[in-house]
Amino acid sequence: MTQQPVQTTDLREALQSAGRKLAEALNDLQALEVKTKSVDVKAGILNEKDARIIAYTKIELDGDTTVIVPTQDENGALVLDQAMLALHKESVADAMQYRTQIINMVVDFFRQGRAR
């Protein structure tokens, strides 16, 4: 049983596709955004288009960070909504862990390519 040789155009297309996907992944790594949303569930129906952002964090690759946290006005004093803040912080930590895994995968990919 002989294997068919890989055609040059197929290989080129596969490499171009992989390159595009890698470029998209690297572009996505430039900024990590986490949005915690709240939605009023009526009669058991979840309608995401009615969701409102209650906490937001954006961490850019250069370290610039934007954070919007949930607060409530209590007699003129802004008080953090601790439950929502805890949920949001957990989501940010999960997203950062995932982002680190992706970065490590990309670094390993390039290291393996250089080692060959």
Image: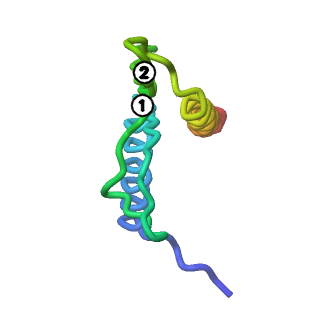
Q: Is residue 104 visible?
A: no
Mark 2 residue type: Val
Q: Position of residue 49 (x, y in %)?
A: 31, 57
Camera-side residue: 90 or 23? 90
The quadrant of the picture occupied by the N terminus is: bottom right
Residue 41: quadrant of the picture:
bottom left
Counting residues from the start of the chain, the first of labels 2 and 1 encountered is 1
**Relative horizontal placement of residue 84, taking residue 51 as reference (left or right):** right
Q: Is residue 81 left or right of residue 75?
A: right
**Residue in the foreground of this view, choosing between 100 and 38:** 38
Residue 67 numbered tag: 2
Which of 15/83 is in front?
83
Q: Which structural element holds mark 1?
A: strand
Q: Please tell me how crowded label 1 is: few (under 14), some (14-19), or many (20+) other residues with Cα within 10 Å.
A: some
Q: In the drawing, does residue 33 fall left or right of residue 4?
A: left
Q: Residues within 10 Å of mark 2 (few under 14, many from 20)?
A: few
Q: Residue at x 42, y 55 (%)?
A: 40
Residue 14, given in percent of the width and then of the height, sits at 42, 60
- Provide residue 114's location: percent of width, then percent of height: 60, 32
Task: Identify the residue shown where x is 64% and y is 83%.
Answer: 2
**Residue shown at 37% from the left, 39% from the top:** 53
At mark 2, the secondary structure is strand
| Residue that carries the numbered disc 1 in the rendered image | 56
Q: Which of the two residues, 69 or 44, is positioned nearer the viewer here? A: 44
**Is the Cβ of the residue at disc 2 closer than 8 Å to that at disc 1?**
yes
Q: Position of residue 13 (x, y in %)?
A: 36, 61
Residue 63's place in the image compared with 106, above or below, is above
What's under tag 1, amino acid-wise?
A: Tyr
Whole-angstrom CA distance, mark 2 to mark 1, is 6 Å
Colour convention: rainbow
